[in-house]
Image (cartoon, coloured by chain):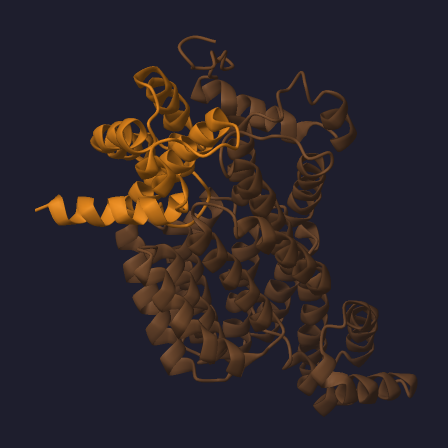
Amino acid sequence: MPITSPARDDEAREVFLRLQGVIRSTLVSYYLLTPEEADGAEEDLLPWFLRLARRSGASPMPPKALRLALLSAACQYGRSLQMWKLGGRRSTDPRLDDVLSREPEEFAVDLQMRLDEELP
Amino acid sequence: MNGGRVLRFPPRAMPPEEIEISADRILALPPAERIEGADAIKLEQPELLLSVCGRLHERLDTSPATVRDDAEHLYGFLRVPARPIGLFDEREYFLGELALIAGTACRHLSRREEARLWFDRAEGPFLHTVSATADLSRLAYQRLALRMEERQLDAVLEMAPPLEESFQKLSMPVDALKVRFLEAIALTEGERLTEASEIYRRICTQAESLGAERLAAAAYGNLTHIYGMQGDAARAIEASRQAIPVLKRLDDRIALAKVQWGLAGMLRETGQLAAALESYRAAQEQFEQIGMRADVAALHLVIADLLLDLGEEATARQAVLEALPVIQELQMVPEGMAALQLLRESLREERIDRPALRELHGYFPEAN
């Protein structure tokens, strides 16, 4: 019996595609990654996200939880890379410092709430 | 470096069919060879580990002893030395998942202290996954199932509703039904059969609508048992007909043995003692093959009781003698120690203290 589920894969890809724009703008506008770095982040995030959707459990992960997990991972990625680039120094941009001082999960929840408000 | 971006050379993604073949190949290898050839078989690839975990989950109800050994081995492989696995939370997820699988297998095998240890091992890593709430809720379910097996009926009936609600909030309807299943088992053990059968019937309908056929079949299996206890042969047989083909197809040997136990109970209740004896022994043999020693021991006591009805006291004594060391070793009935002692003393006098026998096998969750 196959372990991989095409249905879960398709659903996860759809969630990813729908959030791709938000992820990109979060990485570039808030975490100040370059467009190339954002490309790399997306390349890494997609396979991880497809595996996340296939994790064990009697019930598949619901779309809302999938969205939040993806946003959290994107924020974690952006924060880690930017902090590594800064090499422990503060940035010269107070807005970036403010973003970096927040927990990625907390930032992701804010993004999710904004998305929920925008959805009809 | 290229404009600040670290160039990556990700490993070639394996096609799904290749992953599944590799997962089966890995699990077919003896553990020592898996370690030696870990690099060659790419054991650290998250895609592959995901498939392996899926396979282990599938086999929990077929070969819990093998699953326990495999999960323990893979857990050890990932834990020391601390290997980087996948991205973000994947290492924590796999550690938690393998510990959860090992604990679940131990629970099936009535190795309860060991199950508890594995569940504790699962908790730490699960706290750090992105799906921590869902993962910890699945862990809470296994801990509650363990309480059920220890016959903590009041605790199960108290804790099941909030856990079910938690799964509902997380939009995990199948897991919520599994909690209701535990509640129904507790009600059955508390002899609240009407309430229990009502819950099982609802589980059957809802599980079928969610495509959770294993759960639906297991609920039909337990309905077989309840109707059997009530002496309702027609409904018991009908429920078993719903359960058996699906369980056979899924190779769910644990649930099949339980259905067999349920049918034996029905035969006994309807006065077909010889057929009941045969059916109990068939269930016992199935549990023996899976390595579920606690159920084998419990069935020895049930069979002994039936043998007394059939006037075969010597064979009954033999059955009890086979059960007692296992009951003692697995510390199966701490609350039934007095009955156990009475039974042991009566055997020394080459007779069976029947009230003690009945009290003792009353402490085992029957066929659930």
Q: Residue at x 59, y 67 (%)?
A: B146
Residue shown at 35% from the left, 68% from the top: B165
Q: Residue B273, how many percent across, how many down?
A: 60, 75
The chain that appears orange in the image is A
Q: Position of residue B68 (x, y in %)?
A: 67, 47
Could you tell me residue A29's position as x and y percent? 26, 30
Report the chain shown in brown.
B
In this rendering, would B362 be left or right of B325?
left
Residue A16 lies, with reference to residue A104, above or below; the image says above
Q: Residue furthest left?
A: A120
Res B147 → quadrant: bottom right
Q: Is residue A118 visible?
A: yes
Outermost residue to the front? A92
Above-or-below relation of B170 to B22:
below
The front one of B280 and B114 is B114
Give the residue at x 18% y 48%.
A116
Residue positioned most to the right: B348
Residue A22, position as x, y percentages in the image: 23, 33
Q: Confirm whether residue B368 shows in the render.
A: no
Residue in front for this viewpoint, B36 or B310: B36
**Where B248 falls versus A92 (above or below)?**
below
